[in-house]
């Protein structure tokens, strides 16, 4: 009898669904809180936590459950039917394949894998085992997405001219030292690909692709990249992407972790007679079109784990299925195989206190106690905030916008 048969993966899964969380620290804390929320609603039951170092009672913030560093053994021990995987990027594939082999459904954090080949391995393992796998692109749960696609389809902004994505975030130098794999392209010969396009601001790329309906690998016909770094890291922290799709859409993303001030990222749909701006972390949409005043609507969002539980209960379609991750993974693969990011000259950036602008999506730096290390600093690329906005507005790469530090960069094409 196979593990999949033993756990009964195919067919409806009644609630509450037993869940194991792999990776409960860092971003995993949000998943722990969400599982607890769904447990209070009677929809899920946290039965295990997989961590190399066990959580303390304080970290659990609730009733402790089984713990262990051996994921497969924990799945067997707990009889889990669903696993949430929020572990380092290079480990995603192994965790996903083990879960599929045990007939356990998955919510897998983004990026799902550091290479296209490993993504295909995950997708094949889930398909063969008959288990559901949802990628953790939270923005794809926004009800704004189908509304925007409907507006474009009905011609609200005229013929589609292209889609821009802008992300101006702040990360300090300590951010890149929080774990051995952060800011790395490879670690001990293993791909990591922890760049701004593929991890911190991956949602900007994935959301732009979803707005266009470009989800499969074959939907992507071309990729151009400009990868730069101001920080002393391997990966890119300030990058531009131009992607063309089989339907002829041009998608351009301009992103940075070296902003002067952190701002909400957004996707901008350009039409011949108007545009739609979508601040995807806020689920907020602004429609501007000829002959009408501006219209702004804030939409609700469907939780991806809740959506996965609905899928297991009654077949509700997944909002971010692994099978629809191919287009995004084409971007990851292009970044992985591109030349190393171009280091910006010292004259192109300056340092600033880490708490001079609140980082988007992370806690602001606090004041260190007396006698401790000096407060962390961050690297700022002056003028990059305006360049990010202009890139999304004009559908242009940094070199095309006249950024002096980008003028001689060789564009990588895939």
Image (spheres, rainbow, N blue to C red):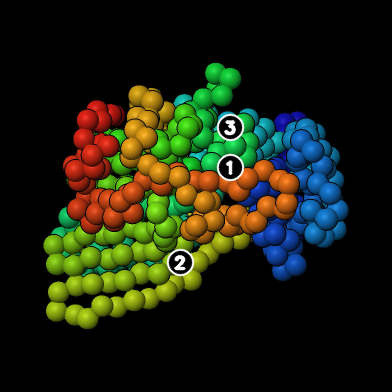
Residue drawn at x 52%, y 51% as measured from the top left? 353
Give the mark nearer the N terminus: 1 vs 2.
1
**Which residue is at the front of the view, 105 or 313?**
105
**Which residue is at the front of the view, 161 or 352?**
352
In this figure, which residue is indicated by the disc labeled 2? 282
Q: Is residue 258 visible?
A: yes
In this figure, which residue is indicated by the disc labeled 1? 174
From what the image shows, is residue 301 above or below residue 115? below
**Distance from Cα at disc 3 to Cα at disc 1:** 13 Å
In this figure, which residue is indicated by the disc labeled 3? 181
350 lies left or right of 302 = left
Q: Residues within 10 Å of mark 2 (few under 14, many from 20)?
A: some
Q: Position of residue 55 (x, y in %)?
A: 81, 46
Residue drawn at x 67%, y 32% as measured from the top left? 98
Q: Are marks 3 and 1 in contact (CB under 8 Å)?
A: no
Q: Position of residue 75 (x, y in %)?
A: 76, 39
211 lies left or right of 332 = left
Residue drawn at x 50%, y 66% as measured from the top left? 301
Q: Is residue 320 visible?
A: no
Q: Secondary structure at mark 1?
A: helix
Q: Which mark is residue 48?
A: none
Q: Are marks 2 and 3 in contact (CB under 8 Å)?
A: no
Give the mark nearer the N terminus: 2 vs 3.
3
* Image-quadrant location for residue 12: bottom right
Q: Are marks 1 and 2 in contact (CB under 8 Å)?
A: no
Closer mark to the observer between disc 2 and disc 3:
3
Q: Secondary structure at mark 3?
A: loop
Q: Position of residue 392 (x, y in %)?
A: 27, 53
């Amino acid at each position: 009898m196979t593990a999949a048969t033993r756990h009964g993966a195919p067919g409806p899964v009644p609630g509450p669904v037993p869940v194991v969380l792999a990776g409960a620290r860092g971003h995993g804390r949000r998943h722990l809180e969400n599982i607890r929320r769904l447990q209070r609603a009677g929809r899920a039951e946290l039965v295990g936590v997989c961590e190399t170092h066990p959580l303390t009672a304080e970290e659990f913030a609730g009733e402790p459950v089984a713990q262990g560093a051996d994921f497969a053994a924990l799945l067997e021990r707990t009889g889990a039917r669903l696993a949430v995987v929020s572990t380092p990027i290079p480990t995603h594939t192994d965790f996903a394949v083990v879960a599929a082999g045990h007939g356990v459904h998955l919510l897998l954090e983004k990026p799902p894998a550091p290479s296209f080949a490993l993504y295909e391995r995950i997708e094949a393992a889930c398909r063969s085992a008959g288990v559901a796998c949802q990628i953790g692109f939270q923005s794809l749960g926004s009800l704004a997405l189908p509304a925007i696609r409907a507006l474009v389809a009905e011609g609200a902004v005229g013929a589609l001219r292209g889609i821009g994505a802008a992300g101006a975030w702040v990360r300090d130098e300590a951010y890149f030292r929080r774990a051995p794999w952060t800011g790395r392209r490879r670690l001990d010969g293993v791909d990591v690909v922890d760049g701004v396009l593929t991890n911190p601001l991956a949602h900007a790329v994935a959301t732009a692709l979803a707005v266009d309906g470009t989800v499969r690998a074959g939907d992507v016909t071309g990729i151009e990249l400009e990868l730069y770094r101001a920080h002393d890291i391997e990966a890119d922290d300030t990058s531009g992407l131009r992607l063309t799709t089989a339907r002829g859409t041009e998608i351009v993303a301009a992103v940075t972790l070296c902003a002067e001030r952190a701002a909400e990222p957004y996707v901008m749909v350009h039409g011949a007679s108007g545009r739609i701006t979508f601040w995807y972390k806020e689920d907020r949409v602004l429609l501007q079109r000829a002959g009408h005043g501006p219209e702004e609507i804030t939409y609700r969002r469907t939780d991806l784990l809740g959506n996965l539980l609905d899928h297991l209960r009654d077949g509700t379609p997944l909002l971010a299925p692994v099978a629809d991750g191919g287009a995004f993974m084409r971007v990851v693969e292009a970044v992985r195989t591109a030349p190393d990011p171009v280091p910006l000259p010292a004259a192109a950036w300056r340092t600033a206190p880490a708490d001079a602008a609140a980082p988007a999506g992370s806690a602001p730096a606090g004041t260190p106690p007396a006698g401790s290390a000096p407060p962390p600093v961050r690297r700022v690329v002056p003028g990059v905030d305006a360049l990010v906005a202009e890139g999304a507005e004009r559908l242009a790469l940094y070199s095309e916008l006249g950024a002096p530090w980008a003028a001689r960069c060789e564009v990588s094409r895939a």
